[in-house]
Image (cartoon, rainbow, N blue to C red):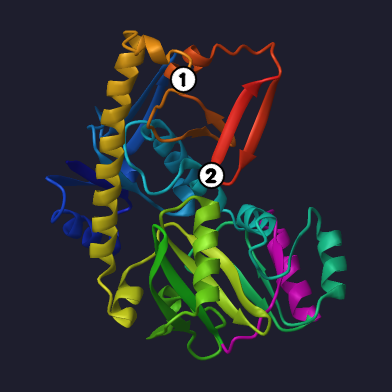
Amino acid sequence: MRAAIISQGSVSSKWTAEAMKKYFDSVDIINLKHIEISFTGKKQEILYKGEHIKDYDAIYAKGSFRFANLLSALTSMLAKDTYLPICESAFTIAHDKLLTQLKLNAANIPMPKTFLTSTVIAAKEILKKMNYPVIMKFPKGTQGKGVMFADSRASAMSILDALTALKQPVIIQEYIETDGTDIRAFVIGNKVVAAYKRISLDDDKRSNIHQGGKGESIVLDAKTKKIALSAARIIKADICGVDILESSKGPVVLEVNLSPGLQGVTKYSKVDIADKIAKFIFEEAQKQKEIGTKQKSKSLMVDFGIEDSAKKDDWNELITTMDFRGERMLLPNAITKKINFNDTEEVVFKFKKGKLIIEKF
């Protein structure tokens, strides 16, 4: 099988690519900066250095918030025929702190109390009511950049006045005292495979390793693991880092990182994360390939009318993966032909967790 990593060429990406070579027949490293998408009429193409991108069984695409739109479009176009550990919508949501807040809050995943305002006047009114210190940050940013600490109302007002010139929305967030520490839980599939505590140096409130923090090994309790897994699942990322604060009321999620560095978590957890990522991607790609083969054979039987006449009115079965477009679920063509529904008829949906039945009304 063939695989590729599409990224900005970080050390973590190179480690993962080397690990994937143990499982896949070939692994290509593709620089995200040389990817372009061509739209010509009804035709869509993904080009790498001007050439049509090769066909792959699995592609691990990741990058910073600056490439969020490109990554979303890219994975949307590849999703039908290639295993992708990160869903197209995840790049839009996880790279925007406000959208992440909205999505996780809707799923009752605990996060710090947060405010967003449309005007400076409204922001100043909020700051009058806040308990200090507070955190002020831009909706987009990585590795602790764009995050500011205000220890008083006067300090917060000064920061706000300075940010007004940048003409960007500002998120105001309650400060949770953790002695300058946070937790990075590394999620792969349905498991937290490793975690470590990040500790800030001196008076810097940002514990991010890229900003000079240090780390130490940690074993997460069941509740924290569950929160990390729920956050990853809601964002629709099979591989990600979930940043968590240990508050007095329990763990709260700061953000979900779709392109987490491997150096810190590998060093402090002593877990070979690159190998675990590579093995997981290989196994999931295998599953998708097997499902695709079964789907094609069953679709051919339907298309050619190869059915047992004695079972015409019985249930038919089609093994396939779900195809989502945003929040909408699309049915395979073979099913829509068989059920003979049309858009003028009313239907009844019967559903519970893991099961859906659609019947004519």
Tell me what residue is drawn at x 34 percent, y 13 percent.
Answer: 308
Q: Which quadrant of the figure has residue 76?
A: top left
| Mark 1, other Cα within 10 Å: few <14 / some 14–19 / many ≥20 | few
Residue range of the region highlighted in magenta in the rendering: 153-179
Locate residue 230, reporting x and y percent: 54, 61
Identify the residue under disc 1: 314
Pick the residue in front: 329 or 243.
329
Q: Nearer the viewer, mark 1 or mark 2?
A: 1
Tell me what residue is drawn at x 53 percent, y 15 percent.
Answer: 339
Q: How many marks?
A: 2
- In the figure, is residue 217 to the left or right of 294? right
**Image disc number at residue 108:** none
| Mark 2, other Cα within 10 Å: few <14 / some 14–19 / many ≥20 | few
Disc 2 marks which amino acid? Gly
Above or below residue 288? Residue 253 is: below
Let me know if residue 141 appears in the view: no
- In the figure, is residue 113 to the left or right of 218? right
Helix, strand or loop at mark 2: loop
Let me know if residue 200 appears in the view: yes
Is 176 inside the magenta-drawn segment? yes
Q: Which quadrant of the figure has residue 268?
A: bottom left
Identify the residue under disc 2: 354
Mark with earlier residue (1, 2): 1
